[in-house]
Structure formats: C-alpha cells, structure tokens
Amino acid sequence: MDFELTSEQDALRRRVAGFVAEHILPLETERENFDAHDNIALPVLSKIRDKARSAGLWAPQSPVERGGMGLSMVARAVFYEEANRSIFGPVCFNCAAPDDGNMSILARLGTPDQQDRWLQPIIDGTARSAFAMTEPHPGGGSDPGMMRTRAEKRGRTWVIHGHKWYITGAAEAQHFILIARTSDDPKRGHTAFLFDADQPGWRIDRRIPIMGPEEHGGHCELTFDGLEVHEDNVLMAEGRGMKVTQTRLGPARLTHCMRWLGLAKRCVEIAQDYAAKREGFGVRLADRESIKLMLGGLAMDIEVGRLLTMKAAWEIDRGGFARKEVSMAKIHVANLLHKAADTCIQINGARGYSKDTVLEWIYRYARQARLVDGADEVHRMVLNRILSEEGRDFWRWEAQS
C-alpha cells in the first residue's frame, strides 16, 4: 500500500478543510442554527448545501455523470475525515448516513430506471432516504436469519407486512430501501424493495427518543400492514436481499469510521487549545505530564484508526471485500471516538461538560458508534471466524507478483 496521497487528493483535502473552516464551523457557535434534535436546522442546511454545490464539493460517493464527484474509497477517506471536523459537516456535503450508503448501493446495483427514479433525487438533495432492516425482538437485528417482516408475491406485486425499528432518517425520508423475507431459504430468503414515503400500507409509529443528537429524521419504529411494491422496484433480484445488505453495510461501516476520525481529531483540537491557555496552581495544563500522556495517547490511537481505515479503503478500491479490515476499523474507531470525547471533556473540566463547546454533543453521539452497523462483539466474532479460517494467514502481507 502506498501511503502517499496523490496531488489531486491532497488538493481536495485542503479544499474541504477550507470550506469547513470558513462556512460550517462558525455555525456551531449559535444555538439558532440547531434544530430541536441538536442537528443543523434545515433552512441553514439548505443555504450551506447550495454553497457546497457551487464549490464542487457535493455527493462525493456518487457518479460524476449524475452530479456527484465519483470519488474512490481512499479519496472519500480523505474527504470525510476533513468534512467531519464539524458536527454539521457531512450532511452539508451530502455524505451523511444513511443517504451516503443508500446512494452508493443504488449507484452500484440499481438499474438505470431505478437510478433515475430512486437515486437521482437523493443526489440532487431533493429527497432523503432510509434503509429499513432492523427489527424489534424476536425479529432480526445483527442476525438477519431472525427477520420476520415478510413479502408475498401477488401477480407482479409484492405485499409486505412486518415491523421495523431504529430506522435512521425515516421521519424525513422520501425514498426507502426495505429488506423483507420472501422465502425460508437461509441464503436466498430475503429481498430488497424500493418504496416511496407517499405509498399506502405503512406508517411511522414513533420517533424513538435517544440519548444523543439525532440525524435528520431521527430513528423510527415502522409498521408495514399491506405495503404494495411492484416487481420493477425490487433491487437487484428476488432472493438477493442479503447480497444487497452485505454490499451496502461494509463500505457504510467504513465511511462511518472516516467521519468519526474527523470528530475524534476535533475533540483533541478543542482540548489542546484549552490546555494551552488554562493555568492551575501556576502551571499550564499543557505542561502537566498527565495532560501530555492523555493527548499523546489519543494522537497515537487516532493514527492507528486512520491506518486501519485507509487500509480497508485501499482493499475495497482494489476489488477486495475487506471484511476483516472493515471490522477491525469499526471496532477501533468506534471505541476511539468515545475515548477521545471522554478524555477531552476531562481536560476541559466543566467547560467540556457544558454546551460551550461541541464536546458534549460528540460524547452523546459517540456512544452509539459501538452499536450501529454491528456491535463490537459481532465484529469480534467475525474476526475470530476469519482467524479460524485463515490461521497465520490472517496477518499476511500482500506481495507483488
């Protein structure tokens, strides 16, 4: 792996960093720029998105011919890390979850007609989206084999009944990707469906309250009581729902890591600034050995996370699945984000616990990182399975032929 960025990638990094510093970071200081759920207010977001489009920093994951930037995974790692220096950054560039992953999967697996109907409005920013898979007990979560939402074929239409929850963005989504069981086949028993919020046969039961700040549209509980989806709106093919899911979730987990690294770096930045100014008992905090150990340890952990993330991105770009690389990055960076927020709040003292900085926002947000897109324990089980299969080859270096 080459650890050097291309000149184009480094120029992109500097452009994103400059845009965030000039246009997005200042928004965090005024409470009127926040909505009721602690995210950027939609009227403010609309103006910043217009500026991002004009700057050519829009939909980095999407095809150039559809108005995106068509970036590789390595280039996205560079972009997303800089974008999430601000808590508002990713959504301003149209690369926030869940739209980010949904755009990627529709661009990769959707038919041209499906891309026109379901993908293009998300790229354009005229529609938001959601991915509906997780179910309450006894339904499917990390184990899709437990899924109970079912779709029955009637002529050329699928009729869907079931129950989903913690569906990110659902309250403001217009376009949905829904995973439902279509047979009892353990490998080909699930199908991915595309549907619109205006279709009858489904409802949002509630927006589930959570401890952290919320993405636009929250995390919702949904009921399907006869939603009808035409067979033309099956994504990929009947029975290929798990293929759709696997294709989406691996890169989506990795882009989470890219964004979380930006937040972790922001935590350190705030702590460094405070420690350089704050004195106690005649000594600057920055000169105390305990503070040096805290910040030095975080700097190392962030760099480890960046290397894990970039290795996984490189593996995907060269055509690999990067299963173990993504799982290692997901575990490490999720825990790192929480550690960074916690440590930097400690350094800032009461200031860090207040809303005078974004540290408390990041701290509340960070706890979800060890749960979303597979809990730590699930990814460790995945790594153990790969270790059992590969043995010493788990740690192999790829060699040029």
Image (spheres, helix red, strand yellow):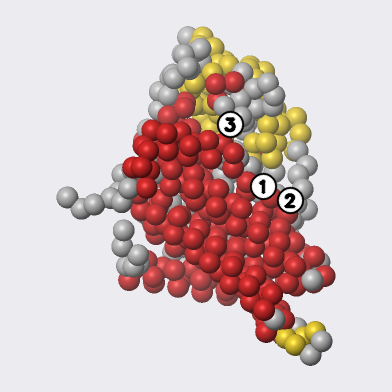
Could you say which disc has been placed on residue 142 in the image? 3
* Viewer-nearest residue: 369 or 66: 369
Q: Mark 2: which secondary structure?
A: loop
Q: Which mark is residue 368?
A: 1
Give how far across and how far down residue 306 sits, in percent: 47, 60
Which residue is found at the position 33% from the left and 42% from the top?
393
Question: How far apart, in angstroms, are the residues tagged by discs 3 and 1?
Answer: 15 Å
The mark lying in front, picked from 2 and 1, is 1
Q: Nearer the viewer, residue 373 or 391?
A: 391
The picture places residue 38, in percent across and down from the top left corner, at: 74, 56
Q: Position of residue 6 (x, y in %)?
A: 32, 67
> Do labels 2 and 1 touch, CB within 8 Å?
yes
Q: In the image, which disc is placed on residue 260? A: none
Task: Work out how far the residue at label 2 is from the one at label 1, CA to CA, in angstroms.
Answer: 8 Å
Say which label, 2 or 1, has the lower sequence index. 2
Identify which residue is drawn at 55% across, 69% down.
299
Query: Can you say whether 51 is above or below 100 in the image?
Result: below
- How many marks the image carries: the answer is 3
| Three-letter code, disc 1 | Gln
Badge 2 is on which residue? Answer: 212
Q: Amino acid at mark 2?
A: Gly
Residue 378 visible (yes or no): yes
Distance in Å between CA atoms under marks 2 and 3: 22 Å
